[in-house]
Amino acid sequence: MTRFSPDLHGAKTMTSGWTALLLIMVLINPSCHHENDRQRLIVTGTVVNLAGMIYLLEQDTAELRKLDSISLTGDSTFEFTVFPDETSIYAIRFKSTRQLVFIAAPGDTIRIRGDFLDFPGTFMMEGNPETALLQSFYRFTFQNTRKVDSLQQIIELSQGTADFYSLSVRTDSLFALIWEMQRDYEKALLRENAGALASLLIVNFHFGVKPVLSPETDRSDYARVDSSLRVAYPGNRHVAFFHRWLREE
């Protein structure tokens, strides 16, 4: 990805003496290189059974912005390098609309691996505590999603049968149980990790067609996340946006 570089047309009059002086400064004070290394964010991955375009996106407060892209032609390994100013929310989007969301800060290296034929079941993300927290959340949620999908298949296959009504009643109770499990898990996760930026994704997560938590029914959870994040990430644009949004709710 091309980095910003200043216009140097005005530097044509630089003398050889100044050039030599700048070279000496770089040699005796290489901190600028270390600073670039510290600010670099690397996202690398190995995904088998994957070909085509993949994209690195960043979640702004209003939209997902494309930062970079790469085309895989039989090679399952990819790498992106960007230079962010603060901790932010990112996504790797594969073909169609499948994507993995993660949290990363300047200096992080995020590693992704999995089998695209078993998305997202086999996928793993690592690189920092925020992404590790999201990985645990995704895995638990994916297991519940598979349970719901199985129940939905049972309902569809039993339509028109004599015991369809009694079966639908039983499956409805199982749906409700899974929903409560997801809700209890999210609330416990937020109590333990309210100061994690990943909590913004958890409080806004939809399980099925509706959100699990809401400011109306879970105001204390939202308030805990808001206050904890403003301490953990002062000045972060995602935290500031959430704070303003919550005050308006």
Image (tube, rainbow, N blue to C red):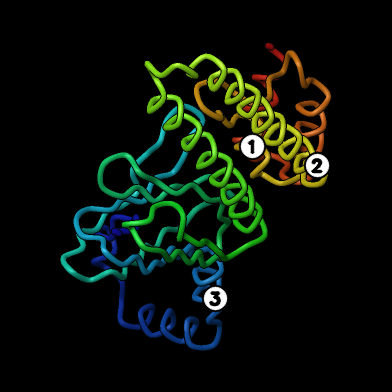
Residue 191 vertical position relative to residue 107 in the rendered view, above or below: above
Residue at far front of view: 162
* Residue at the (76%, 27%) spot, across then down: 222
Q: Crowding near pointer 3: few (<14 within 10 Å), some, many (20+)?
A: few
**Residue type marked 2:** Val
- Occupied quadrant, residue 240: top right
Disc 3 versus disc 1: distance between alpha carbons?
35 Å
* Residue at the (42%, 30%) spot, across then down: 63
SS for callout 2 = helix
Q: Position of residue 163 (x, y in %)?
A: 50, 19
Is residue 5 something one can see in this rendering? no
* Residue at the (66%, 53%) spot, across then down: 133
SS for callout 1 = helix
**Residue type marked 1:** Ile
The residue under label 1 is: 202
Q: Crowding near pointer 1: few (<14 within 10 Å), some, many (20+)?
A: some
Mark 2 or 1: the one toward you: 1
Q: Position of residue 148 (x, y in %)?
A: 53, 34
SS for callout 3 = helix
Disc 2 versus disc 1: distance between alpha carbons?
18 Å
**Residue type marked 3:** His
Q: Nearer the viewer, residue 197 or 119?
A: 119
- Occupied quadrant, residue 194: top right
Is residue 118 something one can see in this rendering? yes
Instruction: Mark 3 or mark 2: name the one nearer the start of the chain.
Output: 3
Disc ID at residue 231: 2
Instruction: Mark 2 or mark 1: name the one nearer the start of the chain.
Output: 1
Q: Nearer the viewer, residue 199 or 144?
A: 144
Mark 3 or 1: the one toward you: 1
Q: Position of residue 165 (x, y in %)?
A: 52, 14
Q: Dividing the image into 4 quarters, which one contains the N terminus?
A: bottom left
Disc ID at residue 34: 3
